[in-house]
Image (spheres, coloured by chain):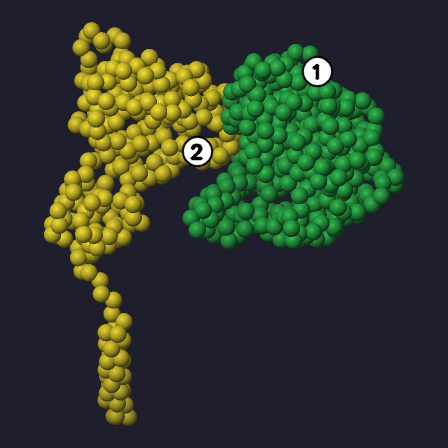
Chain colours: A green, B yellow
Amino acid sequence: MKTFPIGGVHPPENKLTSGSEIQYLPVPAAVAIPVVQHIGAPAVVVVNKDEKVKTGQVIAQSKGFVSSNIHSSVSGKVTKIDTIIDSTGYKQTAVFITTEGDEWDETIDRSNEIITEIKLSPEEIVKRCLESGIVGLGGATFPSHVKLTVPAGKRCDVLIINGVECEPFLTSDHRLMLERGEEILIGVSILMKALKVNKAMIGIENNKPDAVAHMTNLATAFQGITVHALKVKYPQGAEKQLIKALIKREVPSGKLPLDVNTVVHNVGTAFAVYEAVQKNKPLFERVVTITGKSLSKPGNYFVRTGTPVKELIAAAGGMPEDTGKIVSGGPMMGKSLASTEVPLTKGISGIILFPAADSVRKESMPCIRCSKCIQACPMNLEPYLLMTLSEKGLFERAEKERITDCMECGSCSYTCPANRPLLDYIRMGKATVIKIARERVSKQ
Amino acid sequence: MSLTVPVTIISLSLLALIFAVILYFIAQKFKVFEDPRIDDVQAALPAANCGGCGFAGCRNFAEALVKAENFEGLNCPVGGAAVMGAVAKILGKEAVAVDPLVAVLLCNGSPEVRPHTTKYDGVPDCRMAHSLYLGETDCGYGCLGYGDCVRACNFDAMYMDSKTNLPVIIDDKCVACGACVRACPRHLIELRKKAKKDRKLYVACQNCDKGGPARRACKVACIACSKCFNVCEFGAITIENNLAYIDAYKCTFCRKCVVECPTGSILEFNFPPRKPKTEEKVETKTV
């Protein structure tokens, strides 16, 4: 069975919610929709205080090429435009809306009918993705229209669809594949049309045999789409690792998948693209897994963006008393939240409530040079060395040791027998090196 | 047998002579002229190698001093006027009078006034915490309290107060080298003009939020109400970015602003007690 060759770890899967059907979370009484829900320039707010908005209406316009539109996820009145602490831990501008009913924009097709025929041209598909605010739903939230625009001189011959979901606990993509498989495949066909490729490969880890079987079965009706089961290993859902596993091409350091003639999109993105292109529904809703060992009713929900995390926790049976940490995203790469008021955004695929006993760090001890982190690193780096270099402030050397190749998967910290905070230091060093490199470029 | 000793002595002496001649010419050829005054100046400097002058070490600074036409912008904060006077004497130039500075912390958010809303479990390092989120309190501008500045100080002039969880600067030991200023990721340490009797008066807050959120996060936050600005007769106070700032060069230490400040974010140190009339109102803090 296929997998990537270098590094990787096997954290316990804990997929508690893989059997729970996706439900619709009731529309919240009020939402706070941040204007930064993507990588790139913040969107510019285009609504005013006290203005009435409909569900699906643009409330913030993208600014520049690498940016994304933000749509209202509810209908109601804009109460204020203020800052809120979002899942990044920092204050961001957000549009606060109080819900009044649920009146959708007239152009959105709300029927359950599946539309197979793709009417739009490739250019129109890219334009629709831009207008609908589609971003990568795997967690990185990179604007999809940018990835669908192949620059001159570059070529794409195969589209890779990421259904790996290698993070423990999360099951949103898994459930989506089981319940909206056909829509995803139409979405993949749309992406193929936009990229002008005739081959697409869907990679799914083998811990989801039902999804592999279901998608393989459905894919027979679609031209050029194949489904591939992959050996379970974290971080297979990372772009470069998935490319290596599926088509055995290696993305060079500092390059993009397009440099090896491929593009990777998530299954969640494919579903969002289907909804945007066939139903004209902008991205204001996504599947979020709410899970945790002590939670009474963990599950998967369709959640409107801007919904406070506390509403989702309430739907899942309320916050357990022993909760020590709430993490947005997966347990490996996710970030703990500062409060339960944090709004859910396009990039959050799961909320995990950890019991206090599981959420404290163990005492860090000196490095014994056992090289386990080197074996675990999927990017072929030396984490123990990068940590020391960042700690001592030797950023030039860290740059030479390719610290910027680190994708922050956390395999090194996970595997370290001395519980050293490897990723913490590497992340800080990486940020500093990127900053120094930018200053150098701007000086020239 | 009897010749061995004299032959050895003569041959070795000859070899030594040849090498000495070669070495002499090589030394002449590759001679690097170095101003002898550099050594003298370096000897006069404090040898702290703290970087406070803006150079990598005392040697670099000595070279710069010898090269410089005048001492404008060149100052050893550790040695102060005495050392700069001595250097000027060696080089036959005139010393430029520079006001001595002292570091002050622009935050007064102890846990009592600035409650903790989250718990940070990561590496106890300010840079790290700052790169992750706002910090354990709701104030995203204030002191994080993990002591990067204390670790940066080479002069034992700082320590962490266990009660307030804020760093304390010992005025007598602080040489204003600026290591702590560079270490603080939140830019909370300012080098201010040293006044007579170590008197200090400044706005101990860097929270740029509007009044409401700033006050909710911290009771002693500057809310930019402009009361101090209005009461100041010397034009020493400016309000910018929702923050008041007192210019140390214009301030006359009249202390009117301290009385006026509704949140108590203006701190005064080393002043004599006030007249009984106003004493009840004002909380005087001393180190």
Q: Is residue B124 above or below residue A48?
A: below
Dot 1 amino acid type: Glu
* Picture quadrant where residue A187 is located: top right
Circle 2 packing at 10 Å, graded few (<14), some (14-19), many (20+), is many
> Foreground: A389 or B281?
B281
- Residue at 62% x, 27% y is A70
> Foreground: A216 or A258?
A258
Q: Is residue A162 above or below residue A379?
A: above
Instruction: Verify CB contact (< 8 Å) between mark 2 and mark 1.
Output: no
- Residue at 55% x, 18% y is A48
Q: A348 left or right of A396?
A: right
Q: B46 left or right of A165?
A: left
Provide the secondary structure element on which disc 1 rests: loop
Circle 1 packing at 10 Å, graded few (<14), some (14-19), many (20+), is some
CA distance for labels 2 and 1: 47 Å
Residue that carries the numbered disc 1 in the rendered image: A103
Q: Is residue B203 something one can see in this rendering?
A: yes
Q: Is residue A13 something one can see in this rendering?
A: no
Mark number, residue B126: 2
Residue A149: x percent and y percent?
66, 43
